[in-house]
Image: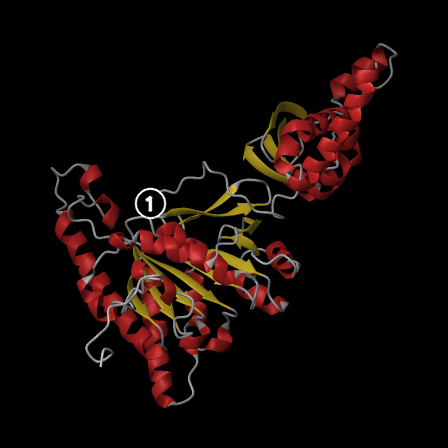
Amino acid sequence: MNALWVTLPVVLVAALVLRRLRPTWYWMTFGVTFAAIRVLARYRSVMDACGLTVPPARWQLSLARIANRPLPEACSPRILRLRPTSTGLVLRVKMRPGQDAFDFTASSDRLRHSFTLQNVIARELRSGVVELRMTGYDVLKTVRMPAASLAEVLRVPVAMREDGEVHYRDYRQVPHALNVGATKSGKSVYQRTLVAGLAPQNVALIGIDCKNGVELAPMAQRFTALADNPADAAELLAALVQYMGGVYQVIRAEQRISVALPDEEITADIWDLPAHLRPVPVVVFVDEVAELALAANKAEEIRRDRIVTDLVRLAQLGRAAGIHLEICGQRFGSELGKGITMLRAQLTGRTAHRVNDETSANMAFGDISADAVLAAVQIDRERPGTAVAGDSSGGWSRIRAPHTTLRKAVDICNAHAYRTPEIPELDAFRPELPARVLVGKVQPKTAASSV
């Protein structure tokens, strides 16, 4: 008995320390058990309080009246499976007749409070089955990407979602995307994480950074082409459109559609081309797109129209040619001029970091989801890197990217500089790399310095 009274305080202190310093370890050792018991014990009363029950069937009521027995209680959704994860619980339930998946989505906040969990997200798996993903702690407070989140070609693990899952930027599924956010919101870190994730892959990276290249120039060893001012950006985009036309000629030459040609050999994009003919995929990063759209005189207006026209062409036609756009900016609305809204309509992926006003959030999600607009406006200033990610289907989720330092991104790009492909049409925009300075080495004296 004395040993028990000594052990209990030690276990309690250890649990409190883990909960504060290592929430994942606390959840896997103590939290998951307590949460599972709490969910199962409160399940029927919570479903009833949240309005997620249905009246008993008529035959049950009739049978109770005939047998002179108490009327049966309301029926709760049937639990199919309760599965623990490293960040929470996954509860799969079978809906009762008359229920809808929207009922569970609308009650997610009440379920969160009732089960005393961090977050609850409901999604329909198939007809009649809903999955409730419940997180036991704030996974976005300190982002730790799982070691098992391996990258694939043009698919980069870039952030953690609030439901504990890894958020991927998949260029094969979502070719073009828009990333908006105010200053110090984490937008540049998100872009840096993408570059670092793509650097080890056989992908051509092209950068347009009109802030004199301060964001992308440090990683220039991994970039096939780089422009740091609007004039060079206009020429680079024109050359990229020309390169895209050449890729389409290769695809047309390989189609050779005939009656004898098998269906699997017919191609309309680069991915079905033979490996020796397949062009390398291209990802174009545009930082501060507003700098490309501003014009102070007639000559700049002509250049601006060329830039926007080429961007629209790349967004409309680039997917089949393996060209993908990642456009970043603080604002992206019609005030930037003609053609901007047409370009925005082609950007399927949307990511909004903290914004300064609701109008900026509407630019990203106004045509997708009103709830996503509200979530983007409510992002905490004290949590840089937190964002709302969505697409044209209307689905969205809160995410937070890990803090990738510039030094880490530069080291990754330098380590994989040998993967940088050469594209002849873009040779004129190959970034000029500065001479490497070896720290700690004595530089040899020149003839002039020895005098």
Q: Residue at x 43, y 88 (%)?
A: 296
Whether residue 55 is visible to the viewer of this picture, yes or no, is no
Q: Residues within 10 Å of mark 1 (few under 14, many from 20)?
A: some
The mark tally for this picture is 1
Q: Assign the C terminus to one quadrant of the image.
A: bottom left
Q: Residue at x 34, y 74 (%)?
A: 307
- At which x and y percent is residue 28? 63, 29
- Can the viewer see residue 313 in this picture? yes
In depth, the one of 152 and 81 nearer the eye is 152
Residue 299 in the image: above or below residue 34: below
Q: Residue at x 72, y 32 (%)?
A: 15
Nearest to the observer: residue 92 or residue 19: 19
The N terminus lies in quadrant:
top right
- Across and down, in percent, residue 65 comes to 85, 15
Q: Which residue is mark 1?
A: 153
Q: Is residue 77 above or below residue 273?
A: above
Residues 11 and 343: in front is 11
Question: Measuring 49% from the left and 53% from the top, which residue is drawn there?
Answer: 391
- Check the image and report above or below for 386 versus 331: above
Q: Where is residue 239, by image quadrant?
A: bottom left
- The residue nearer to you, when weighing 252 against 221, is 221
User: Which residue type carries mark 1?
Assistant: Val
Q: Residue furthest top?
A: 67
- SS state under label 1: loop
The way the protein has been coloured in the rendering is secondary structure
Percent across and percent down for residue 95 are 64, 29
